[in-house]
Structure formats: C-alpha cells, structure tokens
Amino acid sequence: MSNNNHIPPPDMGHGVQYQASAQQDGQFGYEERTRPAVELTQVSPYISRSRTYAFVVDNDGNPIELGSGRFAKAYLGEERWVQSKTAFRRNVAIKILQKGVSAEDQLRFQMEKELLERVQGHPNIVELFASGESDNPAFVPPQLRDRVESDFMLMELLDMSLEERLKGSRDRRTRDDLLSQSPAERLFRVLEYMVPIATAVEYSHLIHDVCHRDIKPANILIKLPDPRLRGSRLRVVLADFNVGKGEDPDSDVSMTRFQNVPGTLYYQSPEQEINQFELLVNVQQGSPDVEFYENFYSNIQANDTFSLWNRPEMYPIVGIDRSRRKLLLGRPWNEPTESNVRAKVTKAVGRPADIYSLGALLYYLASGAWANPKSLYEAFYKFIEYEREDENNNVAAYIEHEYRIIQNLRAPKTENAETGGIELAPEDRFFSYKHYLDGNGELIDPAVMLIVAKAMIRNKPDSYCTTWDLQTSGITQLVHDLMGLYTRFGVDPAAASALIDNDNYPIQQRSGLMSRTWSKLSGAFRKS
C-alpha cells in the first residue's frame, strides 16, 4: 500500500528524515533518506511547473492589438500549461512597452509592475500572471520588433473598459445606456460598477498602502457575463496602476518627485490638476520659515514639498501662515540664503486623490454618464472655502440646504399682484441647480449626492478625508455608505445582483399566481 498521502513522522534523531519530493504526476510524495553524518544538504521545499506564453496572430500572421496607451500597447496572447496532462491553455493580455518612450515613461512601466504585484489577491484588481523582459528574441513577432521593446506584463484578458461599455465604442450591442433606465434601476447598475472598485481601492490603501491616482472609466475593466450561464455575473476590476504610488519603510515608489502626476480632467483631484506651481520667495539658511510674495489659487498644506527650481533637494511643508505670508518647512533651509528667487511647491497626491476620484466617478455614473464632475466641483467651491466654525459648516448641512432651495424653486410659485410675474426670493434668483440633474433632467437622489459631496469636498468635519492626511482610512466609510444605498431602497446588499437583469441572456418568464405576485412586487419597487 502506498504511503504517499500519509503525514510523515517527525525526525526523532534516528538518522532518518523525510523530504517532500515532486512526483511526475505533480503530487507530493515522501522519500526516506539517510541523514549524512556531518551536515545535511539544504533542499528547496518548492516545486515548479512551467507555463509558456506567446502572441496570438490572425490568419495573415499579424498580432492582434487590443488597445494602446501612452507608453504601452496590449496584444492578445495565449498561456499554455506545459506540465499539465490536459494541455490547458487560455487567452491572456500581453502589455508591452513601446519603443522611443521617455525615460520617465519607462520608469512608470516598471513601477506599474511593482505596484500591481503588491496588490494581487483581490477579486476586483486585474490579475497579473507574470512580468519581466524576454530573453527570447522570437517572443516578439517580427511585425512588432521595430515598435515595441521586450519588456512585458502578462495579465488576465477581459472584454472591455467601463468607458467602452458606457459609450459602446467596442461593441454597440453591449452598450450600457444608463439614461434609458429608471433612477432606481440605474442606481443598482451604478453600484454594480462602484462597489467593486471602491472595495479594491480600500484593499490597496489599507492592506498594501498603494494609491492608484488615476481612477476613471477607461482604467476600469469589465468581464461580461457568459450568456450560456444563468448564474454568470458581471465582473468589474481596477487596472492601470502606472501613475500609482506605493510606500514602504525603505522606499517610495511614485512619480511625484519627477513631474506632475497625470490624470484625466473629469476625475482628477485638485492637487493633481495643479500639482506644481511657482512662488517668488526669500529663503534664509538655518531658518524653517520661507517668505512668499505671490497669491496662488491652490492651497498649500502639510505633506506638500518645497524646492527651488533646478535644485534637487526637497523640503517637506508642515504648515502655512497666510497672514504673515510664510511657509513653515519640516526642517531648516540647508542651502545658502537667497532673495527674490523662484521656487516651486509640489502637491502631495495620495489616498485623498483616490477618494475624490471615486466621488467624481459616482457622480458621472449617477447622472447617466452625462454630467461633468469638474462643473460640480466648481459649484462646491464657495462652500469649500467657507472656514467659519459653526453647525452649518459640514457637508450634510450644505447638501440639505441646496436641496431645500431646489425644492423651493421647483414648487409652484405665487404671482406678484403688482407686476403679474412670478415672485422669487432674492437668494434664489441666481441659483442654478443644473449640476444636480441627470441627463434626463431629473434630480439626482440626495443620498447619492451626499456621498459624492463627502468625497469631493474634503477638509470638512464629515468629509471622508482631509487633503493632507495621506494615511487616511476614509475609504472604508465611503464603502460603507455605498453599501448603505442598497438598504435605503429596502434591498439586502447580498441579494442586490439579482435585481439587475442581464441583457446577454433571456430572463425566464414566470407564470400563474407566483408570476402575478412577483410582477406586483417588482412594480411597487420600481415605482418607489
């Protein structure tokens, strides 16, 4: 009787040890070995199994391109399990560096590899199978060798980005037209996109201290449900960490120190939009105070950095005194004293930027993929700058006030007897609420708008974070509030996916008494 599956006895000092060995069929077995008299040879406890990867080509022998970015291209590839009895194979995506890109973009590609490796293990983060530089000159097809390097990432293959899903640019039959749905139905569809991404960001922030810093529909990938499987569901994953930031005790993996942190205007945080700006300053050797003489639009806050142009040394900023026009550095100025010199402030871009982008994304989706989050932020800006400490200086009170005015404007008005016109309160005459409307002209639910505002309006008592707290855990409260939207509509979050009909397979029709009961319940829910 074979003893391959039994647990080996411990070594009791009788000159015999048990060592794991890889059998030909891939199972672990145990071999009895005599212990050497002098010293044991260290044997690795690991086994290895080979997988091979190659580009997939069309009938004409040309590689099949899936997409192209700023410094990399994606092609269809194939993975084979070499030491598998079933000759398992599947399609993958090969992301490969283009030739002729800048040194910073090359570095960005390397950092994306490292950050993506760090955050592996979450179901809503794109899976990375392997990465590196090929030492096989035949790996890259001849048609591509003058256009790409041999530096690659091998990742799971998905169907399309969320941007393509919303616009129908890849396949119009799979387009998700959010404006064609009722507000309640649209909300559940939006949550189907938002909750997975928010939980992926929570995982990357709190478990691996990694920030994405470019959350937008183009960087969210979709796996459509299999139309052959009734239980198949939409899969949503976060991808493209190429402008991300990761920190550990020994290194800071980011591009912030090299140049502006890129982003997409619709979704990037204010600290990304104006990531660096100039100041005319005086610096004095040995002093942590820096005098400045110019006004600036962007706020300066703790964790931002200060430096002189064409000087490598960077100083952390710990505070600002606007009344005295002074910056306070985290350590005294170590270089020679200079007057009227041009300096630059680099904004810190970390976890708060991701929270802002999630709020902007939620607003865009809730509006039916129609509204501009930057216009909403501009509407918020007067309240953002309101600094008086009172009971109304919080996001909830602000949104409640805004919706109260909107309801007043939308209510029937009384006529002025003297002029014969409609009478409006003076504070309402110039108030515009178009940024609170979706693409159909309907008012966005205030509970949704409150979450949007708490993400995009930072630094208030009930905001999800402050812009200078780079270690904020506010993403957890954002996830909690998103899940709470299900409860607001009387739905158990665990069963929410059952409410969303999938266009890719037919819904079985019910009949009889159960059918009529179900129709009444469904109709009542949709009307609510």
Image (cartoon, rainbow, N blue to C red):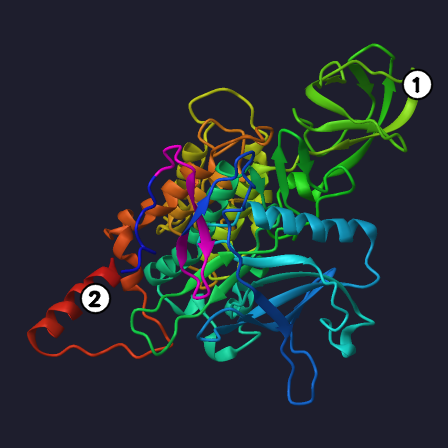
Instruction: Characterize the local packing of mark 1: few (<14), some (14-19) or many (20 or more) Cα atoms within 10 angstroms.
Output: few
Label 1, secondary structure: give it. Answer: strand
Which residue corresponds to the image point at 65% horizontal and 24% vertical from the top-left? 302
Up the image or down, 244 lies above or below 306; here it is below
**Which residue lies most toward the bottom here?**
59
Which residue corresponds to the image point at 27% horizontal and 63% vertical from the top-left? 498
Up the image or down, 473 lies above or below 121; here it is above
Which residue corresponds to the image point at 92% horizontal and 19% vertical from the top-left? 339
Mark 1–mark 2 Cα distance, whole angstroms, equals: 73 Å
Q: Amino acid at mark 2?
A: Gly
Between 6 and 294, the residue placed more toward the observer is: 6
Q: Which residues are magenta?
A: 10-30
Q: Is residue 232 left or right of residue 160?
A: left
Give the number of the mark in front: 1 or 2. Answer: 1
Q: Does residue 427 appear in this view? A: no
The C terminus - image quarter:
bottom left
Q: Which residue is mark 1?
A: 338
Image location (x, y in percent) of residue 359? 50, 46
Q: Does residue 268 appear in this view? A: yes
Image location (x, y in percent) of residue 492? 24, 51
Q: Amino acid at mark 1?
A: Glu
Instruction: Characterize the local packing of mark 2: few (<14), some (14-19) or many (20 or more) Cα atoms within 10 angstroms.
Output: few
Q: Magenta stretch containing residue 83, yes or no?
A: no
The circle drawn on residue 523 is: 2
